[in-house]
Amino acid sequence: MKYGYARVSTDDQKADMQHRALYRAGCRELFTDDGKSGATTNRPRLQQCLKKLNTGDTLMVWKLDRLGRSLRDLITMLDDFKQRGIKFRLAHGSNRHRNTDRPRHVANDRHTGRA
């Protein structure tokens, strides 16, 4: 099953654009944290979403910064997804719907010419 996670940093921002992109990408259930910084670990809807994910599920976010701001936290989360058999996708930008099951080494790809 595809799940979507959206986040807005301030209470006056709206997550509508993220929601539309996630629904268009096939997400059946969305979890949204309103007024939560990506730098904080206090994101209750993200925690609910992470607990709901099972092997074979896919988590989608509009952009990578919606999931977190700390590179260390993002790497830890993506490693956990890999160990649990959970797929991760972006719903916006040039990487939308890209399979992130295997690590990509962008610097290596640039030198070899691989996509």
Image: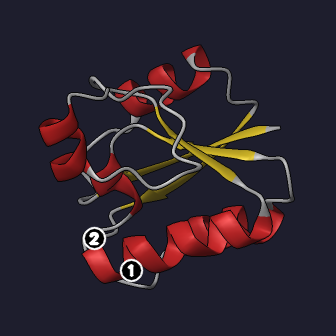
Residue nearest the viewer, comparing 88 with 109 = 109
**Residue 52 vs residue 5: left or right?**
right
| Mark 2 crowdedness (10 Å alpha carbons): few <14, some 14-19, many ≥20 | some
Q: Earlier in the sequence, mark 2 or mark 1?
A: 2
Q: At label 1, which amino acid type do we have?
A: Asp
Q: Residue 92: horizontal and vertical position, in percent?
A: 35, 27
Q: Which mark is residue 73?
A: 1
Q: Secondary structure at mark 1?
A: helix
Query: What is the CA distance from the residue labelled 2 to the residue labelled 1?
Result: 13 Å
Q: Residue 50: horizontal and vertical position, in percent?
A: 69, 67
Please say if 96 is above or below 37: above
Residue nearest the viewer, comparing 88 with 10 = 88
Q: At label 2, which amino acid type do we have?
A: Ser
Q: Residue 44: horizontal and vertical position, in percent?
A: 58, 74
Looking at the rendered image, the quarter that the C terminus falls into is: top left
| Mark 1 crowdedness (10 Å alpha carbons): few <14, some 14-19, many ≥20 | some
Please say if 77 is above or below 4: below
Q: Which mark is residue 65?
A: none
Looking at the rendered image, the quarter that the N terminus falls into is: top right
The residue tagged 2 is: 37
| Residue 11 visible, this angle | yes
